[in-house]
Image (tube, grey):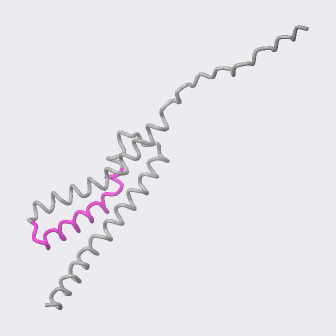
Amino acid sequence: MIAILGASALALVGLQAGIAAPTDAFRGCLREASAKASNEKIGADAIEGYLRTNCSVQMDALKAAVVAFRVKNGMAKKAAAEDATMTVDDYVATPVEKYKFMAEQLTAKPQGVAMTPAAQPAAAEPKKQ
């Protein structure tokens, strides 16, 4: 009984390791592509397409790994493919939102702060004797 449980645990660890490498590669690619997009001044509205295009190899590898993992765990292939697409979408959403936020911050004009002169103390009245 313990041997079966141990073998199952090892198999699961092996399957999860099969997802870890493509996940790390995809996330690394997204970080590098985001930095490159910033240097190239890619617009906030085009960043998602830019990331997906520049990381398509890693994205496809991650999708394949997620589908294989889910199918091996009993999920139907169609559902596994949908799950893989949602997983990729989630990974892309974070750098897209961060890039859009940073682009918005860089283009926002600083709000003018009205500087009022400091109040001057009233001149001291001469003492009457």
- In which quarter of the view is residue 29 placed? bottom left
* Residue sitting at x 20%, y 60%: 84
Residue 96 part of the magenta segment: no
Please determine whether, in this image, residue 16 is positioned above or below residue 45. below
Residue 113, placed above or below residue 92: above
- Is 10 drawn above or below residue 94 in the view shown? below
Give the residue at the far right of this rendering: 129
Highlighted magenta segment, given as a residue range = 51-75
- Which sits in the foreground, 57 or 92? 92
Question: How many marks overall?
Answer: 0
Q: Nearer the viewer, residue 1 or 66?
A: 1
**Prevailing secondary structure of the magenta residues:** helix
On-image quarter of the N terminus: bottom left
Of the pair 63 and 122, the residue shown nearer to us: 122
User: In the figure, is residue 77 to the left or right of 42?
Assistant: left
Q: Quadrant of the C terminus?
A: top right
Q: Position of residue 36 (x, y in %)?
A: 46, 52
Residue 5 in the figure: left or right of residue 29: left
The percent coordinates of residue 110 (x first, y second) are: 53, 30
Say left or right for 17 vs 35. left
Is 59 magenta? The answer is yes
* The furthest residue to the top: 128
Residue 62: image location, x then y, percent: 27, 64
Question: In x, y percent, where is residue 33?
Answer: 41, 54
- Picture quarter containing residue 99? top left
Residue at 17% in and 59% down: 83
The residue sitting at 21% across, 78% down in the picture is 12
